[in-house]
Image (cartoon, rainbow, N blue to C red):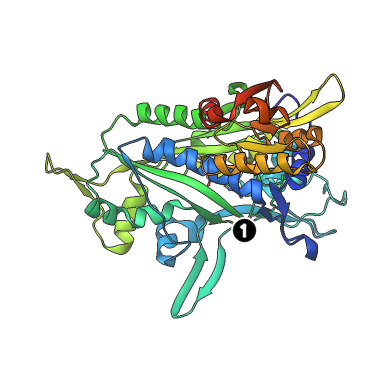
Amino acid sequence: MSESLSSLDVVVSLAKRRGFVYPACEIYGGFANAYSFGPYGVELRNNIKKLWWKMFVNDRSDIVGMDGPILLHSRLWEASGHTTGFNDAMVDCKKCKKRFRADHLVEEATGKDMEGDFPAMNEALRLIPCSSCGANDWTDARQFNMMFHTSMNGFSGDVFLRPETAGAIFVDFKNIVDSMRVRVPFGVAQIGKAFRNEIVAGNFIFRLREFEQMEIEYFIRPEEKWEELFEQWLVLQERFAVSLGASTDSIRRYEHPKEKLSHYSKKTIDIEYKFPFGFKELFGLACRGDFDLSSHAAASGVDLSFRDPETGQSYVPHVLEPTFGLDRSLLVTLCAAYHEEQLEKGSRIVMKFPFALAPVKVAVFPLLKNKPELVAKAREIFDMLKTSFVCEFDDNGNVGKRYRRQDEIGTPFCVTVDFDSFSDGAVTVRDRDTMVQERVSVSELSSYLSSRLG
Ligand code: ATP
């Protein structure tokens, strides 16, 4: 987390004010902790996705991408265990009717993780007052299935919006093996929406009911030394967090205790980030054995083993599952970038996004709005740059105000055209982080910006 960030509220307010994230359906009073991503938010999200795809698909020869549907056959969710087991513990205050995650309530009050242990949670709840009305009158904590149910024309069975993207990868395992020349070990990566009817959503975009995941299923031989690969994946996940702008001391690992693991999981570690509301899960990594492929093979009757073309050996691969939340990545990027700085005169808020993620790379200004020759020259430079960099033309207010606005958007470089530009053929380039200004000739501007942006 950035040193300057004292609370999540300042990020929420900047995100709205500057067109990153808006509360959804605000004109109708808002809707269920849902958010829209504004013009800069969508650029930032796309840049995070591009960075992820490049790092985990394009830069590697052992991972391929895919994009599966959101609506999938209900038999998939039966086989994966989601229909019966994708539950969270829910409890209601009988007095004010407010609903809570029982395990979260208990953990906040006692510091103990009692997830799954309903008698213990109910016992603990007897001593915990409702944070909304102060009463101490709870229903019993009970299981709540988090899948969103819907229906589909021409299909009589249950239809759910997928609660994770991974399922689509497993059911296309055979197609990928048959159509691509993949050899174990190999991975399949996917980015897409997932839906969970969370009992309590909140902390801005940390916990949403509609969110986006970036997931990889990495298939390995059953006898592979998975521990080494597991460690490598953790390091890559941490590296990705750092590339979002997170400092190394703001991330840590949390290993799920053995007794809390699902029966098939050999190990699960969360990468946690120090959000303004505490260390919370950012990414997860699990070693899932052959549970997924074997369950889908058993339920579908289709052989999902892999036949090694060299050895002729046939086996059901085991899988490591590194999973990344896009919305939580975006929140990290916003929190880590947020800086408040005291200046000689006044102060500024500046979003120090890593350059690769900044939604706008270059802003072009005429020094004065009411001088047509300056405006025309600035437009010409904007037109020259805009096909190479995401650029913005700004002639509103004075230059100082434009700098403040671009700082809050996190634009790495501002280019100003002034009267000297006509005599020296140069413009002033101002650096977002140092605020240092330098004169750069227009003929070298593109290559200068390319090399500075990296
Ligand atoms: P949590 O314990 O916070 O509910 P989880 O362990 O259920 O998360 P996974 O099933 O491992 O999460 O999902 C993979 C990733 O998807 C998480 O690491 C997180 O980044 C993201 N994610 C999960 N649930 C949500 C949500 N409700 N809103 C936003 N992102 C989410």
Q: Which quadrant of the structure image shows residue 281?
A: top right
Visible residue check, residue 254: no
Mark 1 lies within 8 Å of ligand 1 (Cβ measured): no
Q: Nearer the viewer, residue 306 or 262?
A: 306
Q: Which residue is mark 1?
A: 197
Tell me the amino acid under the disc marked 1. Answer: Asn
Q: Secondary structure at mark 1?
A: loop
Q: Quadrant of the N terminus?
A: top right
Q: Nearer the viewer, residue 57 or 273?
A: 57
Residue at 25% across, 61% down: 302
Visible residue check, residue 128: yes
Q: Position of residue 389 (x, y in %)?
A: 55, 39
Give the total of numbered labels. Answer: 1
On screen, residue 200 versus residue 260, left or right, reads right
On screen, residue 22 versus residue 193, left or right, reads right
Question: Farthest front residue?
Answer: 423
Q: Nearer the viewer, residue 376 or 437?
A: 376
On screen, residue 240 versus residue 228, left or right, reads right
Label 1 crowd bin: few (<14), some (14–19), many (20+), radius 10 Å: some
Residue at 60% across, 36% down: 361
Q: Position of residue 78 (x, y in %)?
A: 43, 62
Q: Position of residue 189 (x, y in %)?
A: 40, 46
Asked if residue 97 is positioned above or below residue 379 in the image, the reply reads below
Residue at 77% across, 54% down: 138
Ligand 1 quadrant in view:
top right
Residue at 27% across, 55% down: 174
Q: Position of residue 445 (x, y in %)?
A: 56, 29
